Amino acid sequence: MNDLLSGFATVLSPANLLFAAIGVTVGTFVGVLPGIGPALTIALLLPITFSLDDPVGALIMFAGIYYGAMYGGSTTSILLNTPGESASVATSIEGHQMARRGRARAALATAAIGSFVAGTISTVLLSVIAAPVASLATSFRAADYFALAVLAMVCVTALVGRSVVRGLLSLTFGLFLGVIGIDSLTGQSRFAFGSLELLDGVGIVVVIVGLFAIGETLHAAARGDEPSTVEHVGSGGLLGWLSREDWRRSWKPWLRGTALGFPFGALPSGGAELPTFLSYTYEKHRSAHRDEFGKGAIEGVAGPEAANNASFSGVLVPLLTLGIPTSATAAVLLAAFQIFNVQPGPQLFERSPELVWALIASLYVGNVLLLILNLPLIGLWVSVLRIPRPVLHSAILVFATLGVYAVSNSVVEVLIAYGIGVVGFFMRRYDFPLAPVILGVILGPLMEEQFRRALLIGDGNLTVFVTRPLTAVILALAVLALVAPYVPKLLAKARGRDEAPVKKLVFAEED
Amino acid sequence: MRRTAAVLVAGVVLGSVAACGDSGNDSAKADTVAYPTRTLQIMAPAGAGGGWDLTARTIQKTLKDAGIVKEAVEVTNVTGAAGTVGLAQLATKHRGDAHQLMITGLVMVGGIVTNKSAVDLAQTTPIATLTAEEEVIVVPAASPHQNLKDLVAAFRADPASVKWGGGSAGGTDQILVGLLAKAAGVDPKKMKYVAYSGGGETKAGLLSGDLTAAVSGASEFKDLVAAGKVRALAVSGAKGVDVGGGSPVPTIKDNGFDVELLNWRGIVAPPGIKAGERAAVVALLDKLHTSPQWQEAMKQQGWSDFYRSGDAAKAFYDSESARIRAVLVEAGVVS
């Protein structure tokens, strides 16, 4: 506790507060721009910080950038259906529908406040239980990760949407994009057709920018003028951003999102995307307003946004306690630590307590700063929708192109993004859901890699997936999630009342 | 060519190297030209934040801080395929442009082989090798293997029983395991090597119990070694170094296996530059290397000095390319 207080003392110095403020502001804008993510920004800022004597300020700024980007990423997802990061894809599903129905203000507010709530709670968790969580996270083996990926795949079927065939086709497209490039285990190339650019695979940034930013722009151009969004005036509730009803419907998803985001962030190869998809699915099935899903249900924004922010504190758990980065941004943060000659690991808390606790304290401060920065900005962001569509979309196109080029420095990657954009356009035109593509790109390689790794380690013996209790339990849960919806029906049949009106347990989407 | 051939005793890649060996003309007597005369570009053929990027940016900073060049120095990042995307650009787009340099290293040498890159390092004009980092072999604290001899004895008895883990397939870490297998008389094709996408994942794999032993850059496991969670068995350099445990860890050679491998980094110029230009670039790097700012920067980053320039650098590039190709072929990573 004393450590944390002295951490606050460090952060609340004017210079460090300034670094935190710069970090969250830069992060917010980076999150808003499609393609340019926190990992790239921190990497670009690294050389500048070489000249700083004190690593604390730089690390506080970097943490602010990450948090800020998670906040900012929701903005474009909601307003324009063009998520800037993969962790904001789930937000765009309901968020954009809310914006189209004039509820952009409420959507942005529930995202901002939810992020604040999740960020604060998960930071408390980080300060209290970092060590046990880290040791639990490192007990996950390759077979467990495979089982977890299977469970996630089964659970997020809600993303498939109304038509199972279309959803599965989208998923397959994502899985295909995921296999392109060098196979990580053997070093052989797949679907690269001799192109050096394809050897490293199609980056998730390229897919997101192509599918969402470029695809949406093409779609908007093709369908011509859509009725301009009417902004809801004077919702009148507490603080003016959310109505009493919105608050009532948001707080539980915030907490559940946090509960999902933190542990997934802490798992090596967990990441921020999976918990957002899981949170979305969960909210959809638990909601009393299921009929509103697909038409702008606030729970579908509140949950995923809380999840992606909570995952950051989770990511810091293995990073600080074991030196294991679990996301691209964490890997760059690790490089930053090393440049300042700070080696994250079991001894970091003893060796550089002032640095660690200052960083943790800066997360609390950063959360408050972000809330202060973002709530007033909501009005400004919403007015973005008043910009004439052609102007707005050409701006998106410019930023999207710039973003991809900035990440890769390669024209080929830009062309790939546009190619995916064209696919995205036709998917929108013919009502294919987009989220399963992202799911395939993220989950597919994880599943395949861990499956083969587990087999390699188990000498090719399939029993590795059932011999350890943890693996077996997770796989059993996956099977349960798959068959549970049909159990009541089967039971009814067994009793000979096949037409009885049984209440179906729903985990999978009804078609 | 004369020197090149002398070095290529292994001869495995003699054909491919010789075919393009005229790029690094011996230039001992060439006139040194004024250099640089305009903005100097240094390409880091990988993303920002990694080792090559850091090397490029440290050179950039040192050239300015030490007052070696007055002209602007810019760093560009070209990502992809273990640096071979950048290599291809250097050999084609930048051919003959002495103001465009590129960072390279052992990882690229491996990448050229595994990615079947159309361009190889022998097509560039080698300038210098700069720095090197040791590799370390570690086991979990609870492992029965107390030293490298124990581990290799188990590996010999049943190659499949030892699960090695490290960075990407065909990368430095797998190359080291391959060399060790060869030295221990085990068929490298029989080794079970699990590739991870980075040091962090490798650590997680070792701690969770998936791996018997992990191979990584020496600095990667420092904290876990210091905390007693993993045990360092050997380092891959010429002499033992401390990797966090407080006392020097013996080398692989100390354990009786004739293997030495350093993850080195260097710098090359495009093919087709004039002999005088090559001499000028080499002179520039010589100046960089002797500057106190560079020595200080190396100390700060924990890099050991691995400097050789001009013809010595070329000889090293050639012999290293041959050695790495041979081990990757024997390990069955490429055919």
Image (spheres, coloured by chain):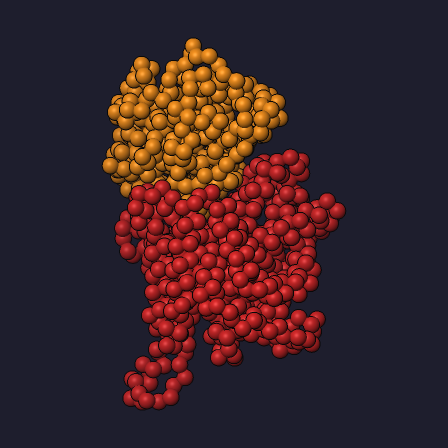
B62 relative to A14 in the view: left or right: left
Residue B164 shows in the view: yes
Toward the right, the furthest residue is: A14
A489 relative to B198 in the view: left or right: left
What residue is rendered at 59% in x and 42% in y? Answer: A45
Instruction: Measuring from the top left, give residue B287's x and y in whole percent.
Output: 54, 18
Instruction: Measuring from the top left, give residue A273's x and y in whole percent.
Output: 48, 59
Q: Nearer the viewer, residue B146 or A106?
A: A106
What residue is rendered at 64% in x and 43% in y? Answer: A58
Whether B63 is drawn above or below B204: the answer is: above
Q: Nearer the viewer, residue B32 or A200?
A: B32
Residue B245 shows in the view: no
Whether A232 is drawn above or below A143: the answer is: below
Quadrant (top left/top right/bottom left/bottom right) for the N terminus of chain B: top left
Instruction: Measuring from the top left, give residue B293's x and y in whole percent.
Output: 60, 24
**Total labels drawn:** 0
What residue is rendered at 38% in x and 77% in y? Answer: A510
Quadrant (top left/top right/bottom left/bottom right) for the C terminus of chain B: top left
Colour of chain A, in one word, is red
**Letter of the chain shown orange in the rendering:** B
Instruction: Measuring from the top left, give residue A379's x and y in whole percent.
Output: 66, 65
What residue is rendered at 55% in x and 43% in y? Answer: A43
Q: Nearer the viewer, residue A61 or B301?
A: A61
Whether A64 is drawn above or below B134: the answer is: below
Residue A110, quarter of the rendered image:
bottom right
